[in-house]
Image (tube, rainbow, N blue to C red):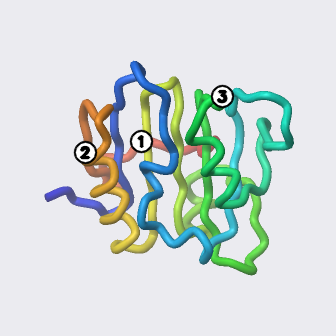
Amino acid sequence: MYDMTCGLEALLSNRQPFQIMDLLQGIPLAEYELYSTGGIVCPSDGLPSGGGSLSAEDLERLSSPPYYVSEMSLYLFPRGMKVRRLKDYADYLQSGCVCGIMYYDCAYLEVYAKEPALLRRFRENIERMQTLMSLCGKTEATDGRTVFF
């Protein structure tokens, strides 16, 4: 069992593209406003490759070719709350954001969630990923992250 005080950290194989919907399986996306930053490589078709608000349908599209997510931060805010980019971990803690997901360098995944049930769901989803190489819990004491991207 992981000490899930603040989050999870996973290393994924970069031999297959990251499938964001595998991570979000069973998460009630309709309950959240979604905000993303960076790294989506795709044809020019209206998805915010540099960041911005996303819909659940946008995330579904990102889980299939021709899209490739090289790095991405995704924040989940309660529906109706104004979404915004978060500067750092302290900003996240003080915000209404309930979850921050960071995927970078085509292999590293970090998930922060304020609700234990939500974090448990993410852990279960990560453990089912075929590309999982390692997974560990993050606590306030062991987490060195200061900046969200």
Question: What amino acid type should be assigned to the residue bearing mark 1?
Answer: Gly
Task: Look at mark 3 in the image and give the residue it sits on.
Answer: 66
**Residue 36 has which mark?**
none
Q: Is residue 87 left or right of residue 7?
A: right
Question: What amino acid type should be assigned to the residue bearing mark 3?
Answer: Pro
Circle 1 SS class: loop
Q: Which residue lies furthest to the left in this view?
A: 1
Dot 3, crowdedness within 10 Å: few (<14), some or many (≥20)? Answer: few
Q: How far apart are marks 2 and 1 (CA)?
A: 14 Å
Q: In this view, does 47 lie to the left or right of 136?
A: right
Residue positioned 27% across, 47% down in the render: 128
**Residue 144 has which mark?**
1
Quarter of the image that includes the N terminus: bottom left
Nearer-N-terminus badge (2/1): 2
Circle 2 SS class: strand
Task: Look at mark 2 in the image and give the residue it sits on.
Answer: 136
Spot occupied by residue 135 in the image (x, y as percentages of width and height): 26, 41
Spot occupied by residue 111 in the image (x, y as percentages of width and height): 44, 51
Question: What amino acid type should be assigned to the residue bearing mark 2?
Answer: Cys
Q: Is residue 15 above or below residue 142?
A: above
